[in-house]
Amino acid sequence: MLQAPEKFQMFIANRFEPGLSGEQVPVLNPSTGAVFAQIPRGNAADIDRAVRAARAAFDGEGCAQGPWGRTTATERGRLLMKLSEAVLRDQELLALLEARDCGKPLKQARADALALARYFEFYAGAADKLHGQTLPYQNGFTVMTIREPHGVTGHIIPWNYPMQIFGRSVGASLAVGNACVVKPAEDACLSLLHVARLAAEVGLPPGALNIVTGLGSEAGQALSDHPGIDHISFTGSPETGRRVSQSAAAHYCPVTLELGGKSPQLVFADADLDAAVPVLVNAIIQNAGQTCSAGSRVLVEASLHERLLERLAAQFERLRAGPAEQDLDLGPLVNRKQQQRVWDFLSDAQGSGIGFAAQGSVIETAPEAGFYQAPVLLDNVPAEHRLAQEEIFGPVLAVTRFRDEQEALRIANGTDYGLVAGVWTREGARQFRLARQLRAGQVFINNYGAGGGVELPFGGTGKSGHGREKGFEALYGFTQLKTVALRHD
Ligand code: NAD
């Protein structure tokens, strides 16, 4: 018997609510293509209610601060620590929700839940360690700087890593005392609604965290337009990021943008291939290539090309995609649109005569209506081709040859993006030269972290966006600096 889709609710001021319009958005399981849940189709009025709840938590009435605005840094740290523990307790439930919602293999979903707990833990510890300075000035003055929260921050979260991106942005923002309004992606928000339940359970006051579900063009747009939002953190496509920036600019609202990339991995003839090959493969198949920091281009020194390609091809041929619960190398892509996008790029490759050097497979028992795509290794992709220039966001790795270090650098830096880069070489001076010259927010030498750990600042340049999240650095973005000059002579 078919089960009716489960109905989820949005979260405003610590209460789950259906949304003012009463309309729903269906939620599909990417592994089967079937609707299994419904979320409220939040609109501008729901966003307004959430912003008001957040403002009440932060500002309170009149000149008094609200219950969240009054918390000390230490109290916020303790609450985040409790939230981290609650996430660890419910890790399996969160992983199952995420696997069903986004199509992630279970091991990836479990790792994402662990990362979420780790973000809360990291920012719990950091909450009361963000200091201002005292500055030398004229005689008779003491001058200090104070880091203060913006007030109410908006968070627009994509579907590829809902828990991780929520952790890095909402975790840091709450730690410094902002109240948050979150608009998760319509394709993936169920795990975050459970985290909201946990936040209320551990004692976050009403309004400190609010989640409005719905479509980007409605709820997301309303969030970027709302004059009650003091800072926006956006992760997603460059096109939507630009739209969010334009809307925010209309009310002078600062924006942090993380917009993906076309991250290169440079492999020189002296590289340790045993170490490099599994990392190169994982960097593109993790989350079925739907990772902003995916290592989607391999640039290889000409003399190594044949040997590296053979090793990569052998690994690609063994990769298998299938339903999330089967925990194979890859799950499905998130939705039909994403699958079509990858198909378009691949047919472009065929039309341009770019060879499929190897392909993995989709297991035979995978449901036909799921959004599967076998991983593909493309060889000799010209550096100017759109396959080497544009973000595919699927399990497609483009290999391009270079003659020498200068050409490698020119190709690596030759896209509009600049998020992450990897370098594989044993030569010390070259490691340093490239670390300095590569246009990227993160450079990994003889490893590749796809964004790295919770502790490492992350963000890009150019079309990859601006601002930094993760690590201690994120706390600066979620605060503003006040200078106080005190005259006492
Ligand atoms: P998107 O940028 O449209 O969606 C990201 C988030 O923005 C979602 O929460 C969405 O609801 C919201 N949104 C959409 N329109 C909005 C608007 N007008 N105002 C405010 N918020 C809005 O991305 P997409 O269409 O889901 O995916 C398209 C491509 O974007 C992908 O193929 C991929 O290349 C890229 N992408 C990048 C990342 C990343 O991590 N950098 C994540 C997701 C998608």
Image (spheres, grey):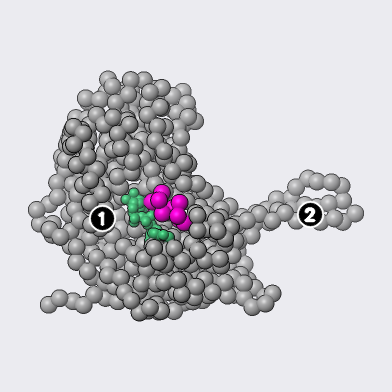
- Secondary structure of the magenta portion, mostly? helix
x and y, in percent, of residue 475 in the image: 56, 54
Figure quadrant of residue 368:
bottom left
Could you tell whether 6 is left or right of 217 in the image? left
Which of 34 and 390 lies nearest the eye of the viewer? 390
Secondary structure category for the residue under label 2:
strand
The answer to whether the beta carbon of the residue marked 1 is less than 8 Å from any atom of ligand 1 is: yes
Tell me the residue that label 1 is attached to.
337
Quarter holding the N terminus is bottom left
Figure quadrant of residue 442:
top left
CA neighbours of label 2 inside 10 A, class few (<14), some (14 to 19), many (20+): some
x and y, in percent, of residue 288 in the image: 26, 49
Give the residue at x 30% y 70%: 25
Point out the frontmost of discs 2 and 1. 1
Which of 471 and 242 lies nearest the eye of the viewer? 242
Q: Which residues are magenta?
A: 234-244
Name which residue type carries label 1.
Lys
Which of 89 and 400 lies nearest the eye of the viewer? 400
Tell me the residue that label 2 is attached to.
485
